Each structure stands twice: as structure tokens, then as C-alpha cells.
């Protein structure tokens, strides 16, 4: 008696997906660079003794770069969580793999023999 096996359908992922992720990361970096100036001014107005000094002529000051990096990391974490939640379950999930049943010898080896 012959059996016919149906081949598994492999889901092809889009090869441009990593490029899209890189574009999102770059756009978030540009957005965080644009947002950090009002953010620093807000912190300076609320906490005048915070010691944040920012010269408007120096676009690469340490304060500006630090706040830009912090905002960028925060936005990356938020967007990554949204993508992880929206993406759903992985197609390569290990719970769906059918394992062959263990033999008595394998069970005894793993659990230390019969306990009777």
C-alpha cells in the first residue's frame, strides 16, 4: 500500500523586510532628533536647576546627542513591541513539531529507572 505525502507549504517571507526595518529605524532617529529640542526646553522650563546647557549653534552637543539617543531607543522599544504583538505567532514555533514517543529505555535513562 502506498502513501501519498503532501509537501509542506513553505511561507516565503518578503526579502525587503529587513530593509523596511532599517528605514523605520532611520526615520525614528530623524524624528527623535527633531523632537529632542522641544523636549530639552520643556525639561529646562520645569526643572531650571537640572544643569542642561544647550547652545543653539552647536547641533552636535553632548546633551543633544544624548537626548536624541535616549528618545530613539525608547521609540525603537515601543515600535518593536507593537510589531511583536501585531506579528502574532511564529510559523516555526516548536510546539507544533510532532515528536516521536519515547521508548521505555529512554524514559528510564532520563528519569532514573522505575520507582515502584
Image (tube, rainbow, N blue to C red):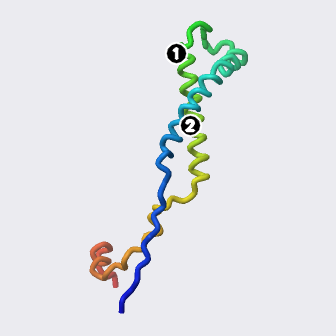
From the viewer's side, name the closer residue of 60 and 105.
Answer: 60
Q: Quadrant of the N terminus?
A: bottom left
Earlier in the chain: of badge 1 and badge 2, it is 2
Residue shown at 50%/46% (left/top)? 17
Q: Which mark is residue 62?
A: 1
Residue marked by disc 2: 24
Expressed as whole percent of the image width and height from the top left, the position of residue 56 reads: 62, 8
Residue shown at 67%/22% (left/top)? 39
Expressed as whole percent of the image width and height from the top left, the position of residue 99 reads: 39, 74
Side of 2 where 41 appears, left or right: right
Question: How busy is the neighbourhood of tag 2: few (under 14 within 10 Å), some, or many (20 plus)?
Answer: some
Side of 71 where 101 appears, left or right: left
Side of 79 where 3 appears, left or right: left
Where 39 falls versus 23 (above or below)? above
Task: Give the image quarter of residue 25.
Answer: top right
Question: How busy is the neighbourhood of tag 1: few (under 14 within 10 Å), some, or many (20 plus)?
Answer: few
Q: What is the spatial separation of the Cα atoms under label 1 and label 2, in whole angstroms?
A: 24 Å
- Count of residue discs: 2
Expressed as whole percent of the image width and height from the top left, the position of residue 43 reads: 68, 19
Residue shown at 50%/51% (left/top)? 14
Amino acid at each position: 500500500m502506498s502513501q501519498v505525502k503532501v509537501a509542506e507549504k513553505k511561507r516565503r517571507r518578503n526579502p525587503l523586510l529587513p530593509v523596511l526595518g532599517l528605514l523605520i529605524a532611520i526615520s525614528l532617529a530623524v524624528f527623535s532628533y527633531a523632537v529632542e529640542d522641544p523636549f530639552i526646553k520643556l525639561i529646562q522650563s520645569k526643572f531650571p536647576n537640572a544643569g542642561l546647557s544647550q547652545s543653539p549653534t552647536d547641533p552636535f552637543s553632548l546633551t543633544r546627542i544624548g537626548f536624541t539617543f535616549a528618545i530613539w531607543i525608547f521609540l525603537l522599544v515601543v515600535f518593536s513591541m507593537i510589531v511583536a504583538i501585531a506579528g502574532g505567532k511564529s510559523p516555526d514555533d516548536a510546539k507544533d513539531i510532532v515528536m516521536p514517543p519515547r521508548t521505555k529505555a529512554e524514559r528510564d535513562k532520563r528519569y532514573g529507572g522505575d520507582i515502584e
